[in-house]
Amino acid sequence: MAVTIQQIADKAGVSRGTVDRALNHRGRIAPEVAERIQGIADQMGYVTKTKRKDKEKEIIAKIGVVTQLAHASFMLEINRGIREAREELKERGIQVLVKEVASVDAKEQLCAIEELIQEKIQGLAVMPVESEKIRMCLNQLIEDMKIPVVTFNSDIVGIKRSCFVGMDNKKSGRAAAGLLGTLTRGKGKILIITGYFSNPVNNFRVDGFVEELKESYPELEIAGVQASFDETKEVQRIIENGMMAVSGISGILVVSGGQAGVAEAFSTLKLDRRPYVVIYDHTPKNEKALRENTVDFLIDQNGYVQGYRPLNILADMILKGKLPEEEYLYTDIKIMTKYTLASQN
Protein backbone atom coordinates (compact mmCIF):
# COMPACT_ATOMS: atom_id res chain seq x y z
CA MET A 1 0.00 0.00 0.00
CA ALA A 2 1.35 3.46 -0.93
CA VAL A 3 2.65 5.69 1.87
CA THR A 4 0.52 8.82 2.38
CA ILE A 5 1.49 12.38 3.27
CA GLN A 6 -0.59 12.06 6.44
CA GLN A 7 1.45 9.04 7.59
CA ILE A 8 4.67 11.00 7.08
CA ALA A 9 3.18 14.00 8.92
CA ASP A 10 2.19 11.81 11.87
CA LYS A 11 5.68 10.35 12.14
CA ALA A 12 7.39 13.71 11.74
CA GLY A 13 5.02 15.47 14.15
CA VAL A 14 4.11 18.20 11.67
CA SER A 15 1.08 19.16 9.58
CA ARG A 16 0.16 17.70 6.18
CA GLY A 17 0.78 21.12 4.64
CA THR A 18 4.34 21.22 5.98
CA VAL A 19 5.05 17.78 4.55
CA ASP A 20 3.56 18.78 1.19
CA ARG A 21 5.72 21.92 1.02
CA ALA A 22 8.87 20.01 2.00
CA LEU A 23 8.44 17.17 -0.50
CA ASN A 24 7.32 19.34 -3.39
CA HIS A 25 9.75 22.23 -2.71
CA ARG A 26 7.19 24.97 -2.51
CA GLY A 27 6.60 27.61 0.14
CA ARG A 28 8.84 28.64 3.02
CA ILE A 29 10.12 25.92 5.32
CA ALA A 30 13.24 25.66 7.48
CA PRO A 31 15.97 23.65 5.66
CA GLU A 32 16.57 21.36 8.63
CA VAL A 33 12.84 20.57 8.87
CA ALA A 34 12.62 19.89 5.13
CA GLU A 35 15.66 17.62 5.34
CA ARG A 36 14.20 15.67 8.28
CA ILE A 37 10.84 15.22 6.50
CA GLN A 38 12.57 14.09 3.29
CA GLY A 39 14.57 11.56 5.29
CA ILE A 40 11.42 10.14 6.91
CA ALA A 41 9.69 10.00 3.52
CA ASP A 42 12.62 8.13 1.97
CA GLN A 43 12.72 5.73 4.90
CA MET A 44 8.99 4.98 4.52
CA GLY A 45 9.29 4.53 0.75
CA TYR A 46 7.17 7.53 -0.26
CA VAL A 47 7.04 8.41 -3.95
CA THR A 48 5.86 11.89 -4.98
CA LYS A 49 3.04 12.31 -7.47
CA THR A 50 5.47 13.62 -10.06
CA LYS A 51 7.75 10.61 -9.68
CA ARG A 52 4.77 8.24 -9.75
CA LYS A 53 3.54 9.76 -13.00
CA ASP A 54 7.00 9.52 -14.53
CA LYS A 55 7.28 5.93 -13.39
CA GLU A 56 3.87 5.05 -14.84
CA LYS A 57 4.87 6.52 -18.19
CA GLU A 58 7.91 4.26 -18.37
CA ILE A 59 6.57 0.94 -19.70
CA ILE A 60 9.09 -1.87 -19.31
CA ALA A 61 6.83 -4.71 -20.44
CA LYS A 62 3.29 -5.54 -21.50
CA ILE A 63 1.14 -8.44 -20.28
CA GLY A 64 -2.02 -9.48 -22.10
CA VAL A 65 -5.12 -10.95 -20.51
CA VAL A 66 -7.87 -12.79 -22.39
CA THR A 67 -11.05 -13.86 -20.60
CA GLN A 68 -14.23 -15.59 -21.71
CA LEU A 69 -17.88 -15.38 -20.65
CA ALA A 70 -17.27 -11.73 -19.79
CA HIS A 71 -20.84 -11.10 -18.59
CA ALA A 72 -21.14 -14.18 -16.36
CA SER A 73 -21.59 -13.54 -12.64
CA PHE A 74 -18.48 -15.51 -11.61
CA MET A 75 -16.36 -13.00 -13.57
CA LEU A 76 -17.09 -10.24 -11.03
CA GLU A 77 -14.44 -11.47 -8.60
CA ILE A 78 -12.00 -12.49 -11.33
CA ASN A 79 -12.21 -9.03 -12.86
CA ARG A 80 -11.66 -7.44 -9.45
CA GLY A 81 -8.44 -9.41 -9.09
CA ILE A 82 -7.31 -8.40 -12.58
CA ARG A 83 -8.02 -4.71 -11.89
CA GLU A 84 -6.08 -4.68 -8.63
CA ALA A 85 -3.10 -6.51 -10.12
CA ARG A 86 -3.11 -4.14 -13.10
CA GLU A 87 -2.95 -1.08 -10.84
CA GLU A 88 -0.15 -2.54 -8.72
CA LEU A 89 1.91 -3.59 -11.74
CA LYS A 90 1.88 -0.04 -13.10
CA GLU A 91 4.43 0.83 -10.43
CA ARG A 92 6.65 -2.00 -11.66
CA GLY A 93 6.55 -0.56 -15.17
CA ILE A 94 4.18 -3.21 -16.54
CA GLN A 95 1.16 -2.37 -18.64
CA VAL A 96 -1.70 -4.88 -18.53
CA LEU A 97 -3.92 -5.08 -21.63
CA VAL A 98 -7.24 -6.86 -21.14
CA LYS A 99 -9.43 -8.40 -23.84
CA GLU A 100 -12.84 -9.57 -22.62
CA VAL A 101 -14.62 -12.14 -24.79
CA ALA A 102 -18.33 -12.59 -24.12
CA SER A 103 -18.62 -16.14 -25.48
CA VAL A 104 -16.75 -19.46 -25.54
CA ASP A 105 -16.11 -19.05 -29.24
CA ALA A 106 -12.60 -20.02 -30.34
CA LYS A 107 -12.61 -17.61 -33.28
CA GLU A 108 -13.33 -14.62 -31.04
CA GLN A 109 -10.64 -15.68 -28.60
CA LEU A 110 -8.11 -16.09 -31.40
CA CYS A 111 -8.86 -12.55 -32.58
CA ALA A 112 -8.33 -11.22 -29.05
CA ILE A 113 -4.98 -13.02 -28.73
CA GLU A 114 -3.87 -11.78 -32.15
CA GLU A 115 -4.66 -8.19 -31.17
CA LEU A 116 -2.49 -8.57 -28.07
CA ILE A 117 0.37 -10.01 -30.13
CA GLN A 118 0.18 -6.89 -32.31
CA GLU A 119 0.62 -4.86 -29.10
CA LYS A 120 3.91 -6.74 -28.54
CA ILE A 121 3.02 -8.38 -25.23
CA GLN A 122 5.75 -10.26 -23.34
CA GLY A 123 3.37 -12.52 -21.40
CA LEU A 124 -0.21 -13.82 -21.65
CA ALA A 125 -2.76 -14.83 -19.02
CA VAL A 126 -5.69 -16.60 -20.67
CA MET A 127 -8.90 -18.46 -19.88
CA PRO A 128 -8.58 -20.79 -22.89
CA VAL A 129 -11.47 -22.15 -24.90
CA GLU A 130 -11.14 -25.89 -25.61
CA SER A 131 -10.16 -25.84 -29.27
CA GLU A 132 -7.38 -27.25 -31.42
CA LYS A 133 -6.89 -23.81 -33.00
CA ILE A 134 -6.44 -22.22 -29.57
CA ARG A 135 -4.01 -25.00 -28.65
CA MET A 136 -1.92 -24.37 -31.77
CA CYS A 137 -1.99 -20.61 -31.25
CA LEU A 138 -0.81 -20.83 -27.64
CA ASN A 139 1.95 -23.30 -28.49
CA GLN A 140 3.15 -20.93 -31.20
CA LEU A 141 3.34 -18.12 -28.64
CA ILE A 142 5.23 -20.29 -26.17
CA GLU A 143 7.60 -22.17 -28.47
CA ASP A 144 8.19 -19.84 -31.41
CA MET A 145 7.69 -16.38 -29.92
CA LYS A 146 9.00 -17.27 -26.42
CA ILE A 147 6.01 -15.60 -24.76
CA PRO A 148 5.15 -17.28 -21.42
CA VAL A 149 1.51 -18.28 -20.96
CA VAL A 150 -0.39 -18.79 -17.71
CA THR A 151 -3.88 -20.27 -17.88
CA PHE A 152 -6.45 -19.40 -15.25
CA ASN A 153 -9.98 -20.50 -14.35
CA SER A 154 -10.02 -22.86 -17.35
CA ASP A 155 -7.10 -24.96 -18.58
CA ILE A 156 -6.22 -26.68 -21.84
CA VAL A 157 -4.16 -29.85 -22.33
CA GLY A 158 -1.39 -30.18 -24.87
CA ILE A 159 0.33 -26.81 -24.38
CA LYS A 160 3.56 -25.94 -22.60
CA ARG A 161 2.06 -23.22 -20.44
CA SER A 162 3.96 -22.11 -17.35
CA CYS A 163 1.20 -23.00 -14.88
CA PHE A 164 -2.53 -23.06 -14.22
CA VAL A 165 -4.25 -20.95 -11.55
CA GLY A 166 -7.76 -21.98 -10.60
CA MET A 167 -10.04 -24.43 -8.89
CA ASP A 168 -9.59 -28.19 -8.99
CA ASN A 169 -12.96 -28.48 -10.69
CA LYS A 170 -13.24 -32.26 -10.58
CA LYS A 171 -12.53 -32.22 -6.85
CA SER A 172 -15.15 -29.52 -6.36
CA GLY A 173 -17.67 -31.70 -8.22
CA ARG A 174 -16.92 -34.52 -5.80
CA ALA A 175 -17.48 -32.10 -2.92
CA ALA A 176 -20.86 -31.14 -4.37
CA ALA A 177 -21.79 -34.83 -4.60
CA GLY A 178 -20.85 -35.29 -0.96
CA LEU A 179 -23.06 -32.39 0.06
CA LEU A 180 -26.13 -33.52 -1.88
CA GLY A 181 -25.53 -37.16 -0.95
CA THR A 182 -25.53 -36.24 2.73
CA LEU A 183 -28.56 -33.95 2.48
CA THR A 184 -30.66 -36.51 0.58
CA ARG A 185 -29.35 -39.47 2.61
CA GLY A 186 -28.33 -40.98 -0.68
CA LYS A 187 -31.86 -41.36 -2.00
CA GLY A 188 -33.73 -39.82 -4.92
CA LYS A 189 -32.69 -38.14 -8.15
CA ILE A 190 -30.36 -35.24 -8.92
CA LEU A 191 -30.95 -32.74 -11.73
CA ILE A 192 -27.68 -31.27 -13.02
CA ILE A 193 -27.58 -27.94 -14.84
CA THR A 194 -24.41 -26.92 -16.67
CA GLY A 195 -23.63 -23.83 -18.73
CA TYR A 196 -22.03 -24.95 -21.98
CA PHE A 197 -21.17 -28.53 -22.91
CA SER A 198 -18.12 -27.06 -24.64
CA ASN A 199 -16.82 -25.54 -21.40
CA PRO A 200 -14.25 -27.87 -19.77
CA VAL A 201 -14.70 -26.17 -16.38
CA ASN A 202 -18.37 -27.19 -16.32
CA ASN A 203 -17.56 -30.65 -17.64
CA PHE A 204 -14.93 -31.37 -14.98
CA ARG A 205 -17.38 -30.39 -12.24
CA VAL A 206 -20.04 -32.69 -13.65
CA ASP A 207 -17.53 -35.53 -14.13
CA GLY A 208 -16.34 -35.27 -10.53
CA PHE A 209 -19.92 -35.17 -9.27
CA VAL A 210 -20.99 -38.26 -11.23
CA GLU A 211 -17.88 -40.22 -10.22
CA GLU A 212 -18.42 -39.53 -6.53
CA LEU A 213 -22.12 -40.37 -6.77
CA LYS A 214 -21.34 -43.74 -8.30
CA GLU A 215 -18.73 -44.53 -5.66
CA SER A 216 -20.41 -43.22 -2.51
CA TYR A 217 -24.14 -42.85 -3.26
CA PRO A 218 -25.07 -45.58 -5.76
CA GLU A 219 -28.80 -45.22 -5.00
CA LEU A 220 -28.84 -41.58 -6.11
CA GLU A 221 -29.82 -41.31 -9.77
CA ILE A 222 -29.00 -38.60 -12.30
CA ALA A 223 -32.26 -37.11 -13.57
CA GLY A 224 -30.45 -35.44 -16.47
CA VAL A 225 -27.67 -33.01 -17.39
CA GLN A 226 -28.88 -29.95 -19.30
CA ALA A 227 -27.14 -26.84 -20.64
CA SER A 228 -28.46 -23.42 -19.63
CA PHE A 229 -25.93 -21.22 -21.51
CA ASP A 230 -25.57 -19.36 -18.19
CA GLU A 231 -29.02 -17.83 -18.72
CA THR A 232 -31.37 -17.26 -15.76
CA LYS A 233 -34.49 -17.95 -17.80
CA GLU A 234 -33.04 -21.17 -19.14
CA VAL A 235 -32.16 -22.40 -15.63
CA GLN A 236 -35.73 -21.60 -14.60
CA ARG A 237 -37.16 -23.47 -17.58
CA ILE A 238 -35.00 -26.54 -17.00
CA ILE A 239 -36.03 -26.80 -13.35
CA GLU A 240 -39.73 -26.24 -14.01
CA ASN A 241 -39.83 -28.80 -16.82
CA GLY A 242 -37.68 -31.26 -14.89
CA MET A 243 -39.76 -31.09 -11.71
CA MET A 244 -42.99 -31.61 -13.66
CA ALA A 245 -41.67 -34.39 -15.91
CA VAL A 246 -39.61 -36.43 -13.44
CA SER A 247 -40.86 -37.57 -10.06
CA GLY A 248 -38.60 -37.91 -7.06
CA ILE A 249 -36.07 -35.14 -7.76
CA SER A 250 -34.46 -34.58 -4.37
CA GLY A 251 -31.53 -32.40 -5.37
CA ILE A 252 -30.38 -29.84 -7.94
CA LEU A 253 -26.81 -28.96 -8.84
CA VAL A 254 -26.05 -25.83 -10.87
CA VAL A 255 -22.38 -25.83 -11.90
CA SER A 256 -22.48 -22.58 -13.89
CA GLY A 257 -24.22 -19.19 -14.14
CA GLY A 258 -27.88 -18.22 -14.25
CA GLN A 259 -28.48 -19.43 -10.69
CA ALA A 260 -31.14 -16.78 -10.08
CA GLY A 261 -33.40 -19.00 -12.17
CA VAL A 262 -33.60 -21.43 -9.24
CA ALA A 263 -35.62 -18.97 -7.16
CA GLU A 264 -37.79 -18.06 -10.15
CA ALA A 265 -38.61 -21.71 -10.78
CA PHE A 266 -39.47 -22.44 -7.15
CA SER A 267 -41.70 -19.36 -7.06
CA THR A 268 -43.62 -20.57 -10.11
CA LEU A 269 -43.88 -24.20 -9.01
CA LYS A 270 -45.06 -23.35 -5.47
CA LEU A 271 -43.63 -26.57 -4.05
CA ASP A 272 -44.56 -27.85 -0.61
CA ARG A 273 -40.96 -28.90 -0.19
CA ARG A 274 -38.20 -27.87 -2.54
CA PRO A 275 -35.25 -30.08 -3.52
CA TYR A 276 -31.87 -29.46 -1.90
CA VAL A 277 -29.74 -27.14 -4.03
CA VAL A 278 -26.00 -26.60 -4.47
CA ILE A 279 -24.68 -23.77 -6.65
CA TYR A 280 -21.29 -22.23 -7.51
CA ASP A 281 -19.63 -18.84 -6.97
CA HIS A 282 -19.97 -16.19 -4.28
CA THR A 283 -21.74 -13.29 -5.98
CA PRO A 284 -24.25 -10.79 -4.56
CA LYS A 285 -27.19 -12.62 -6.18
CA ASN A 286 -26.01 -16.00 -4.95
CA GLU A 287 -25.45 -14.65 -1.45
CA LYS A 288 -29.06 -13.41 -1.54
CA ALA A 289 -30.21 -16.90 -2.53
CA LEU A 290 -28.40 -18.38 0.47
CA ARG A 291 -29.86 -15.83 2.87
CA GLU A 292 -33.38 -16.42 1.56
CA ASN A 293 -33.07 -20.24 1.80
CA THR A 294 -33.47 -20.73 -1.93
CA VAL A 295 -30.27 -22.79 -1.99
CA ASP A 296 -28.46 -24.78 0.68
CA PHE A 297 -24.78 -24.62 -0.21
CA LEU A 298 -22.56 -22.44 -2.34
CA ILE A 299 -19.15 -23.60 -3.59
CA ASP A 300 -16.82 -20.66 -4.17
CA GLN A 301 -13.68 -20.89 -6.33
CA ASN A 302 -11.90 -17.74 -5.07
CA GLY A 303 -12.15 -15.85 -8.34
CA TYR A 304 -10.22 -12.87 -6.99
CA VAL A 305 -7.03 -14.94 -6.69
CA GLN A 306 -7.60 -16.39 -10.17
CA GLY A 307 -7.60 -12.87 -11.60
CA TYR A 308 -4.84 -11.43 -9.42
CA ARG A 309 -2.19 -14.15 -9.21
CA PRO A 310 -1.47 -14.94 -12.90
CA LEU A 311 -0.43 -11.35 -13.64
CA ASN A 312 2.03 -11.31 -10.76
CA ILE A 313 3.43 -14.70 -11.81
CA LEU A 314 4.03 -13.39 -15.33
CA ALA A 315 5.54 -10.15 -14.00
CA ASP A 316 8.05 -12.12 -11.90
CA MET A 317 8.91 -14.29 -14.90
CA ILE A 318 9.48 -11.29 -17.15
CA LEU A 319 11.32 -9.03 -14.70
CA LYS A 320 13.12 -11.54 -12.48
CA GLY A 321 13.21 -14.78 -14.47
CA LYS A 322 11.38 -16.40 -11.55
CA LEU A 323 9.40 -19.48 -12.56
CA PRO A 324 6.19 -20.66 -10.83
CA GLU A 325 6.79 -23.03 -7.92
CA GLU A 326 4.22 -25.55 -9.18
CA GLU A 327 2.40 -26.39 -12.39
CA TYR A 328 -1.04 -26.45 -10.76
CA LEU A 329 -1.75 -23.60 -8.37
CA TYR A 330 -5.18 -24.55 -7.09
CA THR A 331 -7.35 -22.04 -5.30
CA ASP A 332 -9.29 -23.00 -2.18
CA ILE A 333 -12.63 -24.78 -2.53
CA LYS A 334 -14.75 -22.80 -0.12
CA ILE A 335 -18.13 -24.25 0.92
CA MET A 336 -20.55 -21.64 2.22
CA THR A 337 -23.95 -21.60 3.91
CA LYS A 338 -26.06 -18.69 5.06
CA TYR A 339 -24.50 -19.12 8.48
CA THR A 340 -20.98 -18.46 7.20
CA LEU A 341 -21.88 -15.23 5.41
CA ALA A 342 -20.88 -11.90 6.88
CA SER A 343 -23.67 -10.43 8.96
CA GLN A 344 -25.68 -7.60 7.48
CA ASN A 345 -26.21 -4.44 9.52
Image (cartoon, rainbow, N blue to C red):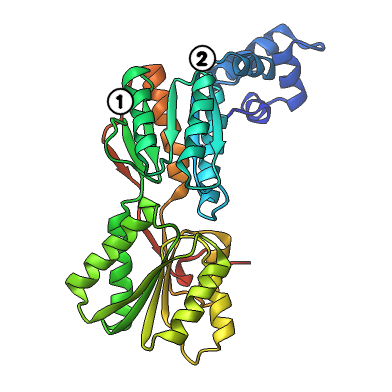
Looking at the rendered image, the quarter that the C terminus falls into is bottom right
Q: Earlier in the sequence, mark 2 or mark 1?
A: 2
Q: Nearer the viewer, residue 204 or 299?
A: 204
Count neighbours of disc 2 (C-alpha within 10 A) and say few if under 14, some if 14 to 19, many if 20 or more. some
Q: Nearer the viewer, residue 139 or 188?
A: 139
Q: Residue at x 54, y 81 (%)?
A: 266
Q: Position of residue 286 (x, y in %)?
A: 53, 65
Q: Residue at x 54, y 42 (%)?
A: 101
Q: Is residue 310 above or below residue 147?
A: below
Query: Of the residues shown, which amino acid type is indicated by label 2?
Result: Ile
Q: Nearer the viewer, residue 93 or 230?
A: 230
Q: Nearer the viewer, residue 55 or 279?
A: 279
Q: Is residue 274 visible?
A: no
Q: Quadrant of residue 190?
A: bottom left
Q: Residue furthest top?
A: 31
Left or right of residue 317, residue 6 in this image: right
Q: Quadrant of residue 11?
A: top right
What whole-number distance in Å separates the C-alpha atoms at marks 2 and 1?
19 Å
Q: Residue at x 30, y 25 (%)?
A: 323
SS at badge 1: loop
Q: Is residue 161 visible?
A: yes
**Figure label count:** 2
Q: Is residue 45 above or below residue 97?
A: above
Left or right of residue 49, residue 219 in this image: left
Q: Residue furthest right?
A: 27
Q: Position of residue 203 (x, y in %)?
A: 34, 57
According to the picture, the residue beneath numbered tag 1 turns out to be 323
According to the picture, the residue beneath numbered tag 2 turns out to be 60
Query: Of the residues shown, which amino acid type is indicated by label 1?
Result: Leu
